[in-house]
Amino acid sequence: MTSWLPLSPAERSVALDVLVHGPLSRTELARRLHLSQGSLTRLTKPLIESGLLVEAPEPGGPGGSRQGRPSRPLDIVAGSRSFLGFKITADAVHGVATTLRSVVTDRLECPLTTREPDAVAALVARMAAELAAGRPAPAGIGIGVGGRVRERAVVGESAFLGWRDVPLGALVRDRTGLPVVVENDVAALVEAETWFGAGRGLDRFAVLTIGAGIGYGLVLGGRRVPYEEEDRGFGRYWIIDPYGPLTPEGARGSAVSLLTIPSIRRQIRAATGRDAGYEEILVAAAAGEPAAFRVIDEAARALGTLVAQIANFAMPQKILLAGEGVGLMDVAGNTVRDTVRAHRHPLAAPVDLETKVSDFHDWARGAAVLAIQVLVLGLGEE
């Protein structure tokens, strides 16, 4: 198959619009990008020749009733390339294979028996080979890690894995022969939701994740806002209640201390003397068990406060609540929504809050989207 060419900024804009919103007629594409028909023809010609864009069948099919010059929409052959995405947690690696439009075609999960970097890279390589079997040759690999990542290649610090300055991209590339993009896992999830999920087509969009930690991402002008602190656990210092619980992972009353799964489990253990899983705690809270109800109610009020603060200051059109901890909404969603309203102006528009129960394969899909962005469209932090 013909190799894709390096894209100019203008060509990249065309390819991105078709990828996310296509198939699109040339007229509609020119309108969306404020281009003349001549400019659009000049930009799309190399994209078609390289195989990145194709002319889709005319709407209505060969026997359609359209009059005049036929319109051949431009589209991307989503299945022409596959991409692999991985999410590395403290105890497992979760992998997916996706199409060019980020549709998951296969998934895989393997436990981590060691967190030694070479062994983790070898496991990712073995999973990549298994995921790649029987489909178009992968164009690249994306890897999401909870922690600080430099140059989309080196894990500068990951508390979950106990890593510092691990050249993960090079370790996996050397074992697979494929280009590799490494990124903070929340940043990858935000990119995936912006392109192909809840934030598609929105100018202002925010993502808040709760689970083992707290993650936050902001999209302005349709693009994720990168910032220096996004990989540094800001939730540890986002104080919701200065008299709230104190836990090892966060300052007293911080978002981390109130909302993360480890903190909630720790509070229950301190109150009851026994260890309970997160789902068990949610069930107990729904049944009115006093300790569980108190902890989950406090967490729900903290979440409502956090959502209201994001809405008040960032003014997004939508906030996506994601992560493995969002089962909280099933049990205490009314408390969350009541708290949001209590912390907003009485005449403020309701917050468009969408909830998505995410498993780790969703995070892996986000990493695959990063690979698509960087390896196909050449997008970087600009």
Image (cartoon, rainbow, N blue to C red):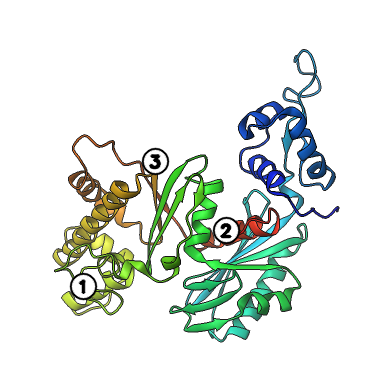
Q: Which residue is mark 3?
A: 317
Q: Check disc 3 and give the amino acid type.
A: Gln
Quadrant location, the C terminus: bottom right
Query: Is 166 or 326 nearer to us in this picture?
Result: 166
Q: Is residue 285 left or right of residue 368?
A: left
Query: Is 74 or 130 nearer to us in this picture?
Result: 74
Q: Check disc 2 and give the amino acid type.
A: Arg
The 10 Å Cα crowd at callout 2, few under 14, some 14 to 19, many 20 or more, is many
Q: Give the number of the disc on residue 379.
A: none
* Labelled pair 3, 2 in contact (Cβ < 8 Å): no
On screen, residue 295 above or below 354: below
Give the mark count. 3
Rounded to the nearest whole Å, what is the CA distance between mark 3 and mark 2?
A: 24 Å
Q: Which residue is mark 1?
A: 252
The 10 Å Cα crowd at callout 1, few under 14, some 14 to 19, many 20 or more, is many
Which comes before the other along the chain, label 3 or label 1? 1
Q: Residue at x 81, y 23 (%)?
A: 62
Name the spot of residue 158 as percent of width and height, x first. 47, 78
On screen, residue 42 above or below 328: above
Q: Residue at x 76, y 54 (%)?
A: 6
Which comes before the other along the chain, label 3 or label 2? 3
Q: Which residue is mark 2?
A: 365
Q: Residue at x 30, y 57 (%)?
A: 328
Query: Nearer the viewer's eye, disc 3 or disc 2?
Result: 3
Q: Is residue 163 left or right of residue 311?
A: right
Name the spot of residue 154 as percent of width and height, x first. 58, 76
- Tell me the quarter of the picture where residue 43 sits: top right
On screen, residue 11 above or below 285: above
On screen, residue 128 above or below 373: below
Name the spot of residue 161 as percent of width and height, x first. 48, 80
Q: Check disc 1 and give the amino acid type.
A: Arg
Q: Is residue 68 left or right of residue 258?
A: right
